[in-house]
Image (tube, grey):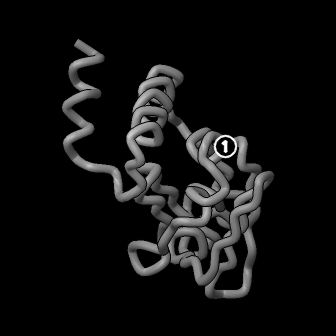
């Protein structure tokens, strides 16, 4: 069994996204090598709580090794998807994120997540 894992390791490590689709139910990543991986959206709480427009505002990063949603402060790695790894975000972190997103929406902030928001996170944890 370990021989099979060793042979598959480079396929996972070198996997790169060519195209991404996000629906209300799933995240689908089409890889450069022809494979497709689909994961339930519920694995990624920030995407679940995002608006349909926010879900569609993404870009490939790291030469296709990841997907980034700037307005959501969310990054997913193709390797993690291939390994079947859902989000590891804690309930506490998600709660702070949801509060910040609610504030941003009320104020009409739709651009990339500002680093200034990190200060508000630190105040809440203190």
What residue is shown at x 55% (from left), y 62% (from top)? Answer: 79
The furthest residue to the bottom = 33
Figure label count: 1
Where residue 42 appears, as percent x and y from the top left, is 72, 42
Where residue 69 appears, as percent x and y from the top left, is 47, 59
What residue is shown at x 66% (from left), y 43% (from top)? Answer: 48
Where residue 3 appears, as percent x and y from the top left, is 65, 65
Where residue 35 appears, as percent x and y from the top left, is 73, 79
**Which element is circle 1 on?**
helix
**Image quarter (top left, top right, bottom left or bottom right) of the C terminus:** top left
User: Splitting the image into 4 quarters, where does residue 99 fall?
Assistant: top left
In screen coordinates, is 97 left or right of 50? left
User: Taking 89 as reference, is 95 above or below it?
Assistant: above
What residue is shown at x 46% (from left), y 50% (from top)? Answer: 72
Q: Residues within 10 Å of mark 1 (few under 14, many from 20)?
A: some
What residue is shown at x 48% (from left), y 72% (from top)? Answer: 59
Q: Which residue is mark 1?
A: 48
In screen coordinates, is 79 left or right of 2? left
User: Taking 113 as reference, is 92 above or below it?
Assistant: above
């Amino acid at each position: 069994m370990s021989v099979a894992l060793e042979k598959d390791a480079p396929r996972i490590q070198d996997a790169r996204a060519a195209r991404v689709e996000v629906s209300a139910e799933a995240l689908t990543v089409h890889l450069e090598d022809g494979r497709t991986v689909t994961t339930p959206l519920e694995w990624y709480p920030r995407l679940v709580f995002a608006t349909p427009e926010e879900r569609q505002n993404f870009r490939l990063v790291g030469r296709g090794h990841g997907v980034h949603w700037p307005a959501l402060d969310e990054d997913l790695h193709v390797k993690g998807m291939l390994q079947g790894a859902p989000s590891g975000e804690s309930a506490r972190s998600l709660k702070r994120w949801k509060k910040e997103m609610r504030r941003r929406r009320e104020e009409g902030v739709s651009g990339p997540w500002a680093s200034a928001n990190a200060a508000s996170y630190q105040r809440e944890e203190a």
